[in-house]
């Protein structure tokens, strides 16, 4: 799915700002049919949960409504007019005046509707968006709504981050010609010093496809024609981790000398390959350093914020990291574009998190209460359908990002139970069919070691999350070290594939200190990470380390969490803990080819 852009033939209006906002407690009839009866306003983009002081809004389960008036630019007569939402978490419905124009499930991926027939250039219309935050046994991620005795509803879920809701990303109105580019797929390869840029272009009508590739100075380096083409770039400059280089591809639809539509996109020429127990980028072994992240900040929750975007990438650079995983859902497209421009490598993950009934007592109870899909009985057909949709839409959105080097189709699902291999095998096949160029993985949970996990055999790279020294062997780093090394060697022997530790870490309260290995102290976090690094350095198949987490983040309440998860190397407001300085020492040395 193409990102909306201003081009020679397309115009774009951003609809962010303060919208009228109302919580649907059952007393609203057709909230789209007239001006919302409310005094509340909510910013877009932002989660709504932490904006207001009213707990009923924060904990609301169900629909909320956003509304604003939009004027269609008067110059758009004769153009197709499209409304595009970058995300509505978890389900969105859009009305133009009284007409429903699109409905979409999945909280972290974009959707749009052609509204040309419902609006007039130069005139205003009422844009109303409903957002539903309910998670059920059939949604991805799954959850369960409980009816409490006092009549309230409570959303339960299995994942360890707060169920922030709302319009988390931008809303756009754009114009495009009737005959237009509807999709572009770019796959790159390298032969000697020549870069190959293979393009596939889909259109909404008949027209000649013309392609022009320019370098960063604007010089044309290759041209081509046709729906399928291969552009050859002599003396190609590769997109490299830490040294991004982006060419500009312009796709034009031409009819008798007239340019009907033009669409521009960045192209990074690079290759990705798994060979033996190595992960190769541009034919060179690559070692991932970095984090599992979250989209999570104070007040805005999961609302996209460009200041935090820039600051987070600055801190990633400061600490010497080269990568992150979009744990546990697709991130805003601005993030992916920024990673492309700055040479940061991304493991791109779907929102399939919490497909596991076995983590912690409360969660197991919740899941057994759920029954059916996602529960102990296995992963139901409706969940599989939602999961397939998540994979399809993620790849459709992110396939052209050079920063994305691998797809992760789930985080810590149950892969121990019978039938989980039957559930996952077709999902791996689907991912490979949609994108034969990138390795595919999922992230394995601690309860499914090598001889137990039924799904790792499908993965190109073994990605595991381990908490030796924290959830097990708590505070005993010597024992943790023995257990960790034994397990890694088990994986290495059984699979012979490259391995990435996609999560390891310890909750840490900044300002807590000790001379002993005391969990929750800054020293303990640093010592625990250090112990993992010693082990990684001894195991050949290790190709990466991503600490859990980049920063502290909000979770649902529970006795395991103190105002959220505190495993960040940085606090929620991005102040470094002692571990951040220790990581910086190791990762800048690795980056610069020194020993720490
Ligand atoms: C893993 C999950 C992650 C949690 C982390 C933790 O993948 O989302 O936040 O553990 O417990 O199970 O901190």
Image (spheres, rainbow, N blue to C red):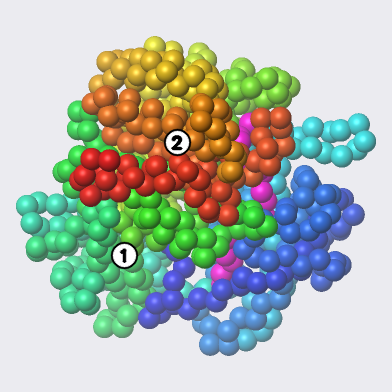
Magenta segment includes 165: yes
The image position of residue 144, as x and y in percent, is 72, 32
Quadrant the C terminus occupies = top left
Q: Is residue 351 left or right of 483 when viewed as pictured?
A: right
Would residue 518 be visible to someone looking at this image? yes
Outermost residue toward the right in this view = 150
The image position of residue 267, as x and y in percent, is 28, 61
- Helix, strand or loop at label 1? It is strand
Front position in the image: 402 or 503: 503
- Residue identified by numbered label 2: 526
In this rendering, the count of numbered labels is: 2
Quarter assignment of residue 250:
bottom left
Q: Is residue 409 left or right of 95 when viewed as pictured?
A: left
Magenta segment includes 82: no
Quadrant the N terminus occupies = bottom left
- Residue identified by numbered label 1: 266
The image position of residue 20, as x and y in percent, is 76, 68
The residue drawn where x is 72% and y is 69% is: 19
In the rendered structure, which segment of residues is drawn in magenta? Answer: 158-173
């Amino acid at each position: 799915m193409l990102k909306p852009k201003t081009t020679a033939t397309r115009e774009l209006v951003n609809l962010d700002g303060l919208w009228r906002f109302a919580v649907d407690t059952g007393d609203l009839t057709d909230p789209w049919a007239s001006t919302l009866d409310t005094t509340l306003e909510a910013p877009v983009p932002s989660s709504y949960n932490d904006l207001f002081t009213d707990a009923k809004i924060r904990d609301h389960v169900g629909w909320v409504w956003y509304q604003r008036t939009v004027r269609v630019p008067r110059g758009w007569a004769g153009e197709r007019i499209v409304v595009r939402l970058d995300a509505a978490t978890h389900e969105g419905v859009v009305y133009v005046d009284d007409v429903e124009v699109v409905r979409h499930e999945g909280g972290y991926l974009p959707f749009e509707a052609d509204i040309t027939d419902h609006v007039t250039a130069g005139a205003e219309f009422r844009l109303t968006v409903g957002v539903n935050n309910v998670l059920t046994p059939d949604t991805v991620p799954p959850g369960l709504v409980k009816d409490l005795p006092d009549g309230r509803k409570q959303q339960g879920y299995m994942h360890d981050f707060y169920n922030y809701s709302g319009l988390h990303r931008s809303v756009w109105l754009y114009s495009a010609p009737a005959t237009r580019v509807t999709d572009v797929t770019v796959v790159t390869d390298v032969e000697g010093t020549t870069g190959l840029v293979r393009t596939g272009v889909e259109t909404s009508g008949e027209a000649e496809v013309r392609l022009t590739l320019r370098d960063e100075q604007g010089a044309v380096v290759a041209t081509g024609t046709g729906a399928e083409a291969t552009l050859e770039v002599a003396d190609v400059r590769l997109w490299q981790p830490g040294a991004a280089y982006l060419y500009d591809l312009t796709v034009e639809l031409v009819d008798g000398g007239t340019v009907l539509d033009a669409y521009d996109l960045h192209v990074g020429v690079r290759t990705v390959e798994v060979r033996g127990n190595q992960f190769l980028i541009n034919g060179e072994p690559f070692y991932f350093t970095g984090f599992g992240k979250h989209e999570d900040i104070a007040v805005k929750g999961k609302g996209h914020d460009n200041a935090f975007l820039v600051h987070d990438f600055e801190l990633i650079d400061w600490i010497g990291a080269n990568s992150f995983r979009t744990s546990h859902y697709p991130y805003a497209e601005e993030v992916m574009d920024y990673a492309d421009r700055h040479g940061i490598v991304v493991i791109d993950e779907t929102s399939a998190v919490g497909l596991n009934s076995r983590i912690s007592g409360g969660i197991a109870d919740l899941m057994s209460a759920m029954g059916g899909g996602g529960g102990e009985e296995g992963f139901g057909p409706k969940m599989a359908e939602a999961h397939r949709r998540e994979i399809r839409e993620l790849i459709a959105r992110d396939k052209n990002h050079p920063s994305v080097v691998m797809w992760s189709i789930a985080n810590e699902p149950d892969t121990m139970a019978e039938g989980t291999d039957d559930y996952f095998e077709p999902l791996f096949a689907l991912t490979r069919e949609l994108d034969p160029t990138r390795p595919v993985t999922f992230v394995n949970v601690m309860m499914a070691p090598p001889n137990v996990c039924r799904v790792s055999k499908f993965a190109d790279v073994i990605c595991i999350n381990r908490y030796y020294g924290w959830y097990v062997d708590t505070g005993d780093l010597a024992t943790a070290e023995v257990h960790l090394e034994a397990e890694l060697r088990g994986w290495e022997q059984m699979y012979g594939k490259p391995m990435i530790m996609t999560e390891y870490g310890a909750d840490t309260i900044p300002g807590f200190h000790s001379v002993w290995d005391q969990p929750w102290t800054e020293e303990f976090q640093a010592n625990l990470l250090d112990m993992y690094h010693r082990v990684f350095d001894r195991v050949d198949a290790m190709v990466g380390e991503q600490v859990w987490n980049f920063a502290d983040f909000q979770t649902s309440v529970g006795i395991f969490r103190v105002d959220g998860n505190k495993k960040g190397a940085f606090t929620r407001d991005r102040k470094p803990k002692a571990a951040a300085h220790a990581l910086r020492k190791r990762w800048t040395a690795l980056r610069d080819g020194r020993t720490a």
